[in-house]
Amino acid sequence: MPTQKGKPSVGKKAGRPAAAPKEKTPKVQKKLLIQDLQRIRDKARAVATIRSSEGRAKITVHMGTCGIAAGARDIMSALLEEMKKKKVTDVIVSTSGCAGLCNREPMATVAIKNQPPVKYVDLTAEKIRKILNDHVLGGQPIVAYALAVGHETLY
Amino acid sequence: MITFKLNGLEVQAEPGWTILDTAKFFGLEIPTLCYMEGLDPYGGCRLCVVEIGEGKQTKLVSSCTYRVEEGLVVHTDTKRVIAARRMMIELMLSTAPMSKEIQDLASKFGVTQQRFPPRNEECVYCGLCIRMCDEQMDARAIGFQNRGYKRKISTPFDVKSEECRLCGACMYVCPACAARCGGPNADTDICNACLQVEPTCLETYGELTCWMYDAGRCGTCVQETKK
Amino acid sequence: MKQPRTHLLVCAGTGCVSCGSFQIKEALENEVRKRKLQDEVVVVATGCNGFCEKGPILLVQPDGIFYQQLKIEDIPRLVEEHLIKGRPIKKLMYVPPAKTTPIPKMKDIEFFKHQRLIVLRNRGRIDPENVEEYIGFDGYEALAKALTEMSPEEIIDIITASGLRGRGGAGFPTGKKWAAGRRETATPKYLICNGDEGDPGAFMDRSILEADPHAVLEGMIIGAKAIGAEKGYIYIRKEYPLALKRMEIAIRQGRDYGLLGKGILGTSFDFDVEISQGAGAFVSGEETALIAAIEGRIASPRQRPPYPAQQGLWNKPTVINNVETWATVPNIIRRGAKWFASLGTETSKGTKIFSLVGKINNTGLVEVPMGTKLRDIIYGIGGGIPDGRKFKAIQIGGPSGGCLPTSKLDLPIDYESLTEAGAMMGSGGMIVMDDKTCMVDVAKYFLNFLRDESCGKCVSCREGTQRMWEIVRNISEGKGKPSDLAVLEELAVACKDASMCALGQTAANPVLSTLRYFRHEFETHILEKRCPAGVCVNLIRYFVLPDKCTGCLACKRACPNDCIRGTLREVHLIDQSKCIKCGACQEACRFEAIEAHRDTAIVVQEEAR
């Protein structure tokens, strides 16, 4: 988990609200017990996934000038909010430049490990949320939103 | 009692004795310079080195600091030891060429050349003066400064000492200034003349000119009969 | 609230910090905030990434893109192009020497590809000032296991079975040392972490302390349980302020989180540590001198036995190990002795960290399994010698080590094979030298270092290093005599044999190894008064070749000391009495008309002034 300067460290007693970033007196850190180690490890899973660049699945939101013009940044925000809500920690999110099919932007490619990647087109915030839940978490690609399955052929 | 082998002989020593203590007890002579009974051993001059161990894993250690162990194998005068002692004497002579004590050691051990340009510091940094001042005179007025080739002996921050009682113990124990060779070529010759009871200063000046002439200690020349 | 998607890992080891990486981090944070990406993108300062040649370094995860040699001006474009538009910037990526295509991903770069990171597994990956990140990457898992599931004897057995040997230089079996400490009954027992790292060119321990201080702490707490110690001292040299700062933070966090102090992790085990700062002496890396320093006395070694494990700090049993050794321990406990012993060679198990410096393309920190060939490190990971020059020698082991020539390039790295070849594993410093390096100059450099750092107790070391330096200096200045080599060897043997501590005992190694493999170079200096590599200033003489000189005045203008005489279209002449051998004239000449030549063959005619 990212720890920004000024924010008190994690481990405060349950129920106490998160302190404002500018708070001067730090909370008293609770001393860890053995079982707390696993808890912290679980909480750090998202960080571990990102930093070791190894996820169960990879979602690439295509940006590029055309993508951003079509609203790819909002798609990205919606995706990240949904991931936070559903506590998804083993999926990595990446960006790429223009994918080539500019009139179908915003686009995203979902690649689950050991499965062929699926390209989704004409995305909206709601569609990307559904893709996350049904395809990434549920395992069922949404054929209706997809353009194609599989990699592009490179000559 | 600890049993170990000294020059092939099995000897017994009290726990806590060093190799040097044991050798002295049994009348075996090991040369020393920075060792003095009554002061903590320092192990700096490396003259008292002896070879311990067997086979290929032998090493040289200073006998004044090495405590005896059960089953230790010690040889006091191997080729390696003699070569090391000779080099130590040659090195010390290059910083204190006028010291009669070191010149005598040179003669005794067959050091016949001085290949290093002399630095007339008249000090071999053996630390006897410091240890004497600290341990026996309880003044601690002098100490080592700096490390390595910049080593020197002085009072803290080179300031005139308030602890020094001018007892002269430091000069008394110093091997470099205890007796100074007064011969005509003192800083370049290792002439062996004093040990042969033919001191060169007698011829040149008509009398002995060792500094701090002390009938009991330095009168070797006149007290020993000509061979 | 969004789940962050990208982490920007800014390398903040001392190397990159000195290139401005803290400013880069600040610029990144500002730009991220400006583009309203702060919920999606996190900026983290990590420890040393290892590829110090190319700092400041940035690693973008999860993309795995490696950016190097960053400047503040690059940051806005980086954020715009890569983070927003998804187009990584080729211009900021690494390009291998003599090639043109950039390599975007870190794992594809030769420097990183061949390394096996175990001790350095967290480098460039975690924020060393945040213990929770350390825990997030399996930190303190080994400690939990050691405290709850293992007895002290079991811990020592695992360390012994793993074959771990001290990484400070001597390579003493760690399990044996711990067992000796355990056997003693006097209390309290102490642990010491030796972070003095005095070897010139070595920065392995500094990197570990800056990148992953908790690994060292975890190792020490496990060791404390094994030996029965209740207090530890971490000795870090004062010249490592960032390492000191990060260790202080780590200790403070450790105490806050119940990982140090009384009742660690809720068990009944107590252990705490204190930092002890070094004060500028190489000799205080010697274990008995270090103990003297912590006790407040002058850092001067004493006779061993008794060894520190029997009588150490304040005469109590003390186990003292190097930073790298302590940092390896948690990995062994976590993954098992058999796993560790499966790496490396028969006698040298596991991996070792080396600092690869000198005339090499990829300067940095590498961790490789023992047994890796020198050739693979220099040409594979190191990327070869820059400027198309040829390899000449590699100095391994710092001032206690030795130089190995081309004939030894296929030597596998392990304690025994290096010692046999005349070098030493040492703490892991590797200095690569090319054909423009003079071996006499190298010997002189190390002897100068050693005579400065000798504690001064033993005549053999104090006078020995001084006199050896004098002889080699004379040789490098053209004042050598043929008898010098014999005297040098005699001195070297005496210094090695008669000194009390390892500094003196190994002080002769630089001289002995250069004499063993490069004797002809010494002889050239002595007999021909010539320096083949063109380094020893007194033995080179700049000389204008009359048949090539066009009289263009270029060298005359370049000369900082006004020692070239001549007018336009007239052959120039260098006044040797004023020449300071800077070489500026040779660089300025476009006709290759200036040569650095040896002394005796030239007779320079003095013109009338």
Image (cartoon, coloured by chain):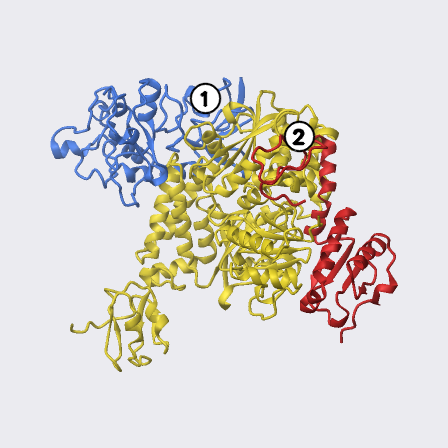
Chain colours: A red, B blue, C yellow
Quarter residue C543 falls in: bottom left
Comparing labels 1 and 2, the label whose residue is closer to the camera: 2
Tell me if mark 2 has few (under 14), some (14-19) or many (20+) residues whose alpha carbon lies within 10 angstroms of its own: few
Between C280 and C597, the residue placed more toward the observer is C280
The chain under label 2 reads A
Question: Furthest-left residue in view?
Answer: B206
Amino acid type for the residue under numbered disc 1: Thr
> Residue A105 vs residue C22: left or right?
right
Between C158 and C522, the residue placed more toward the observer is C158
Amino acid type for the residue under numbered disc 2: Lys
- How far apart marks 1 and 2 lie (CA) works out to 61 Å
Q: Which mark is residue B22?
A: 1
Q: In the rendering, at what x and y percent does residue A117 appear?
A: 81, 63
Between C577 and B44, the residue placed more toward the observer is C577
**Local secondary structure at mark 1:** helix
What residue sits right under mark 2 in the picture?
A: A30
The chain under label 1 reads B
> Residue C503 vs residue A124: left or right?
left
Q: In the rendering, at what x and y percent does residue C100 appear?
A: 58, 71
**Vertical side of B146 occupied by C405: above or below:** below
In the image, what residue occupies the spot 62% across and 61% down? C110
Tell me the quadrant of the picture where the C terminus of chain B can be found.
Answer: top left
> Residue C542 vs residue A30: left or right?
left
In the image, what residue occupies the spot 54% across and 21% down? B3
**Vertical side of C513 occupied by B59: above or below:** above
Tell me if mark 1 has few (under 14), some (14-19) or many (20+) residues whose alpha carbon lies within 10 angstroms of its own: many
> Residue B23 vs residue A138: left or right?
left
Between B185 and B40, the residue placed more toward the observer is B40
